Structure formats: structure tokens, C-alpha cells
């Protein structure tokens, strides 16, 4: 079931990108990676992932803009968005949720916790 689910990891830090790509593949997801919001938008329109793990602070197009685009586009609005960000003030989190994020995980985060939260989202997709 999971192998049909596409996960897009978007982060401008290569270390985070590589470790999340590895973790998600290990969990059995089909994984795509993007190094900034612009690249993410191209992949989103082409692949229509089920879940996006999305950094906020990136060059060109930030995570908030990507989330706003996805949630505002009818054929994409079902995509689950998980913000992963060092922006961990209450106002940052509120903005993320107001834009339609399904989850907001402050950096640094436990990879085990993140994987279990992504799996829970995936389970919700698979059973709906």
C-alpha cells in the first residue's frame, strides 16, 4: 500500500534532504526530493504526491507559498502537508496551520517521531 504513496521532501539543506529521503524510502514510500520551493512546485504538478514534507525558509519560493499554492489548487488540495521548520514560534505554527498544513514539526525533530506521524497520515490516506 505504501509503495503507491508518493512523498515529496522539500528542504534546502542537503543533509536533511538525504536523511529524510533515506527514511521515507526505508518506510516503503515512493520519494521525490526538491531543493527549493520552485523545484517543489514543478514536482507537485507533475507527480501529485500524497504527502509533502516541507521546509519553510528556502530561497526563491518559501514553504508558506508552496503550501498556499497546493491548498488553493482544487486538484492538489487533498495533499497532506507537514511543515518541518526551525521557525518554531507560536505565530509561525499558527500561520502554517492557517495556510492548511496538516502538521507542523519544529526542527530539530526526532526522526522516529516524524516517521510515525507520516505513517499515521499515510494510514489516513489509505483508509479514506
Image (tube, grey):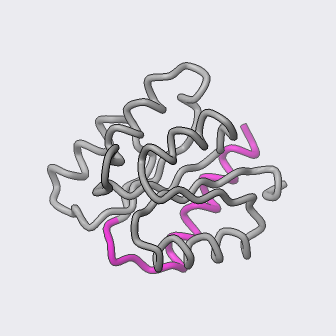
* In this rendering, position of residue 127 left or right of residue 98: right
Q: Residue at x 68, y 44 (%)?
A: 125
* In this rendering, position of residue 108 left or right of residue 26: left
Quadrant assignment for the N terminus? bottom right
Q: Which residues are magenta?
A: 106-128
Image position, residue 89 (x, y; %) = 16, 60
Image position, residue 42 (x, y; %) = 56, 39
Using the rendered view, name the quadrant where residue 43 is placed: top right
> Residue 113 in magenta?
yes
Q: State how many labels appear.
A: 0
* In this rendering, position of residue 31 left or right of residue 40: right
> Residue 31 in magenta?
no
Using the rendered view, name the quadrant where residue 67 is placed: top left
Q: Residue at x 54, y 79 (%)?
A: 112
Q: Of residues 36 and 9, which is closer to you in this image? A: 36
Q: Residue at x 66, y 37 (%)?
A: 48
Q: Of residues 8 and 39, which is closer to you in this image? A: 39
Image position, residue 65 (x, y; %) = 34, 38
Tell me if residue 113 comes above or below residue 73 in the rendering: below
Amino acid at each position: 500500500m505504501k509503495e503507491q504513496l508518493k512523498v515529496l521532501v522539500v528542504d534546502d539543506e542537503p543533509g536533511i534532504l538525504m536523511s529524510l529521503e533515506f527514511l521515507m524510502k526505508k518506510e516503503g514510500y515512493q520519494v521525490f526530493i526538491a531543493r527549493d520551493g520552485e523545484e517543489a512546485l514543478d514536482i507537485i504538478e507533475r507527480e501529485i504526491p500524497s504527502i509533502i514534507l516541507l521546509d519553510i525558509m528556502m530561497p526563491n519560493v518559501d514553504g508558506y507559498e508552496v503550501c498556499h499554492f497546493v491548498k488553493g489548487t482544487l486538484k492538489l488540495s487533498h495533499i497532506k502537508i507537514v511543515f518541518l521548520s526551525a521557525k518554531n514560534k507560536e505565530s509561525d505554527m499558527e500561520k502554517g496551520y492557517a495556510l492548511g498544513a496538516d502538521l507542523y514539526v519544529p526542527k530539530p525533530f526526532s526522526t522516529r517521531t516524524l516517521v510515525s506521524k507520516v505513517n499515521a497520515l499515510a494510514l489516513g490516506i489509505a483508509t479514506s
